[in-house]
Image (cartoon, grey):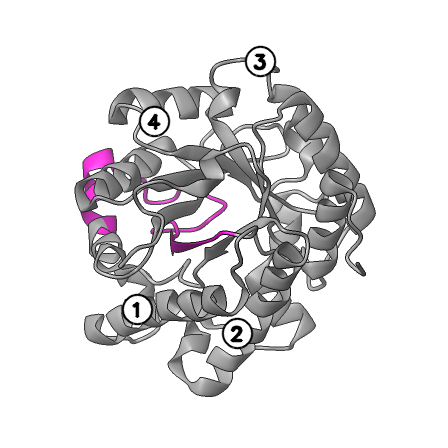
Amino acid sequence: MSKYRAALPQLSDRLFLMDGGLETTLVFHQGIDLPFFAAADQLKDEEGTARLRRYYDDYARLAAEAGLGFVLDSPNWRSSPDWGARMSLSLAELEAINRRGIALMEEVRARHEGGRSPMVVSGVVGPRGDGYRPDGAMSAAEARDYHAWQIGIYASTSADMVAGYTLNYVEEAIGIAEAARRAGLPVAISFTLETDGRLPSGQPLKDAILETDAATGATPAYYLINCAHPSHFADVLETDADWTRRLRGLRANASRRSHAELDASPDLDAGDPEELGRLYRQLRTRLPRLTVLGGCCGTDHRHVAQIRLACTGMDAAA
């Protein structure tokens, strides 16, 4: 049974943390060869599952020791049918991987959740195509039908919600939101942004949020920004605007590099964790509803610890 599906606790004004860049941590810090950059491949065996368990435990502790909430985003960003086929997985094998991702999040929650630290299990959905480029764009109806398979699996588990990450054109966001609504799951929608603060499709973030809300009857519980440095989008965020009040989450990059530069780079640009924490605090000063905070490509527990310090005053060593 879901614990928070009827009332997500992160919709209050309390602070919630998320993890950092799972895939970049596995590849660059741990030397893991991830096929198609799919962290879910680690769920195939106990060694990989144990590796993921340690990863999430580190972040859950950061939240629990500070009395903060935590959103446990499952490692299933690339666990939809097309990506499963690329990894030569049958639908039955892929379904098992999606279920294992949720079961692992439940296990971590059972270990770390406390009265002051609610922990929400979130089933992650990623784009059908590339996270940086709107190649092979679908209609909203096509996206709804495509993502309904994975979201339907989450609906039959203890997942509290669905989160669609690294979405780079609005029709896919609308489709995911509609599939989640039909499945009876709360949904959060996160858009990838470029260095100009626009989606890779060229659409302004404001328009993408307003269009998604208009097409779905404001189905998303909230929106997030991912995969861009705060300097890339700070100028497009309007203080006290209705559309920015819909923004509650932030998974920024610590790197100032463009997506093209990151794709072509053989090394990891981890940026400056302390600077990233300060930039998060500055954004929260302007937009106090930004209360669900984690990292994206290149970030790790150091960055989230600095975000915690900057936004709560509690050092990671506390």
Say which of 288 and 191 sits in front.
288
Verify CB contact (< 8 Å) between mark 1 and mark 3: no
Q: Mark 1 or mark 3: which comes first in sequence?
A: 1
Q: Residues within 10 Å of mark 1 (few under 14, many from 20)?
A: many
Q: In which quadrant will I find the C terminus? A: bottom right
What residue is drawn where x is 28% and y is 75%?
A: 89
Say which of 110 and 234 sits in front.
110
Which residue bears the numbered disc 1? 99
SS for dot 3: loop
Verify CB contact (< 8 Å) between mark 2 and mark 4: no
**Mark closer to the observer (2, 4):** 2
Q: Residues within 10 Å of mark 2 (few under 14, many from 20)?
A: some
Which residue bears the numbered disc 3? 240
Look at the image and give the residue range highlighted in magenta: 118-147
Say what amino acid the circle numbered 4 marks: Thr
**Mark closer to the observer (1, 4):** 1
Determine if residue 215 is in view: yes
Magenta residue check for 230: no
Magenta residue check for 120: yes
Q: Residues within 10 Å of mark 3 (few under 14, many from 20)?
A: few
Taking the image as shown, residue 78 lies to the left or right of residue 53, namely: left
| Mark 1 to mark 4 CA distance (whole Å) | 28 Å
Verify CB contact (< 8 Å) between mark 4 and mark 3: no
Say what amino acid the circle numbered 1 marks: Arg
Question: Residue 302, relative to residue 57: is it above or below?
Answer: above
| Mark 4 to mark 3 CA distance (whole Å) | 20 Å
| Mark 2 to mark 4 CA distance (whole Å) | 34 Å
Which residue bears the numbered disc 4? 212
What residue is drawn where x is 74% and y is 29%?
A: 282
